Amino acid sequence: MIKILLADDSALTRAVLKDIFQATADIQVVGEAENGKVAVAMTELLKPDLVVMDILMPVMDGLSAIEEIMARNPTPILVLSATVEDREVGLVFTAIKKGALDVMEKPAGVEADQASRFAERISERVRLLARIKVIRHYRRTLPKSELPAIRHAGGARNILAIGASTGGPKAVMSIVKSLPADLKATVFIVQHIASGFARGFAQWLDRESDIAVRLAKDGDGFRAGEVLVAPSDQHMIVCGDRIKLTDDAPVNCCRPSIDLLFSSLASERGGEVVALLLTGMGRDGAEGLRRIKLQGGVTIVQDEQSCAVFGMPKAALELDAADEVLPLAGIPKAVSKIFAY
C-alpha cells in the first residue's frame, strides 16, 4: 500500500484528492496538512511514501516545507499547481530545484471526463514517484584526471541534444547552467513534463543560466549559443537547418518524443551531434541515441546511481547506444571537454 500525505490549504482540494485515492486499491491517504509547517511535522511523524504538495499556503509555504522535508526526512514530493501562469510556474520550478520530483496542474473543470482523466493521471504519477528513493546529499565533481576519454572522431561538434523525463528538470538545469553564453553550438532539449509547463521550464532555465533559453518555434534556424526547448504537446524534429514542430501521434506514449528529435538529428546532422539521455522512465530516446552513435555522434547516458529513474538510460545501454555512462555531476565537465570551452 502506498501511503501519501496531502498538503494543501484548500479543504475542498484535499477532499477531492482523498476521494480519488480512496477509489484505488493501492493508495492510502495517511494524513492531511493545511499548511507547510504541519506538512513538515506530519512527514516526520507518518513517514509517507509521497507528499502531494501545494505551493501557496499560509504559515509556511510549500517551498519552505519542501526545503525542510528534504533536509530532515527526504521524501518524494509531487507539486500540484493551480495555474500554469508565469508567477506560479516560476515557484513550481523553484520547488523542483529544492527537491520536488515532479509537477501537475490541478484540474481546471468539474466535467466528469476531465475529472476521470485527472484521477487516472495523478494515480499513475503517485505510483511512479512513490517508488523513487530520494537522498539529500551533494555529489562531488569529478576531477579532471577522472574525466572519461570521450572520442572525438567524426568532425566538429556543434549540436548538443538533451532528453530527459522523470527527475529531469533539475538534472537538465545542472547541465544547462554550466554552459557559457558564447557556446559554439545549438542546444535542443526534450523534457517530458506535464502539459502546459514547458514554457515555464524554458523560462526557469533562462533565468538560471548564462546561455539564452527559449521555447522552440516552428521554422526556427540553428543559432550557436541558444537553447531551444520543445513545447508542450508537440514533437520537435530537425529538417535540414530548421526546426519543425508537429502534432503527430505520440511516440513511446510521449509527445514531444526524444526519439523523434534524436533520430532526426542522426539523419540530418550525424557526427555533429553530442546527445545526452538523462533520468526517466520508459524507453523514449534509446533508439534515437543508438542512431546518433551509428552516425558518428557522441552519446552519453546518466548513470543509475544519480538517476531518479534509470529506465531510459538503461534502455539505451541495452541497445549499446552509449559511448559513456556518467554520473550527473560529471556530465557538465564532459560536455565542456567535448566543446572545448
Image (cartoon, helix red, strand yellow):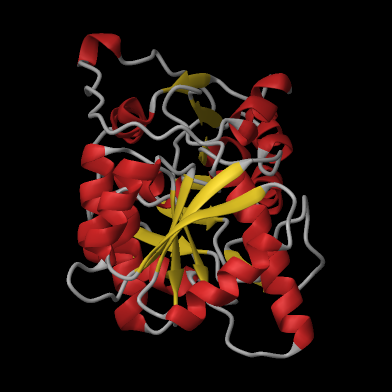
Quadrant in the picture for residue 235 = bottom right
Residue drawn at (28%, 75%) of the image: 57
Would you place residue 16 above or below residue 69 in this image?
Answer: below
Is 182 left or right of 154, judged from the image as shown?
left
Q: Nearer the viewer, residue 12 or 179?
A: 12
Residue 20 image offset from top left, x and y in percent: 66, 67
Quadrant in the picture for residue 228 = bottom left
Residue 132 image offset from top left, x and y in percent: 51, 36
Q: Is residue 219 visible?
A: no
Quadrant in the picture for residue 338 = top left
Would you place residue 234 above or below residue 320 in this image?
Answer: below
Residue 250 image offset from top left, x and y in percent: 78, 61
Residue most extreme to the right:
249
Q: How many marks?
A: 0
Is 252 left or right of 160, judged from the image as shown?
right
Q: Nearer the viewer, residue 257 or 241?
A: 257
Q: Is residue 172 visible?
A: yes
**Which corner quadrant holds the N terminus?**
top right
Q: Nearer the viewer, residue 166 or 250?
A: 166
**Which corner quadrant holds the C terminus?**
top left
Residue drawn at (82%, 66%) of the image: 249
Residue 265 image offset from top left, x and y in percent: 63, 48
Residue drawn at (22%, 24%) of the image: 141
Would you place residue 205 above or below residue 217 in this image?
Answer: above
Residue drawn at (54%, 75%) of the image: 15
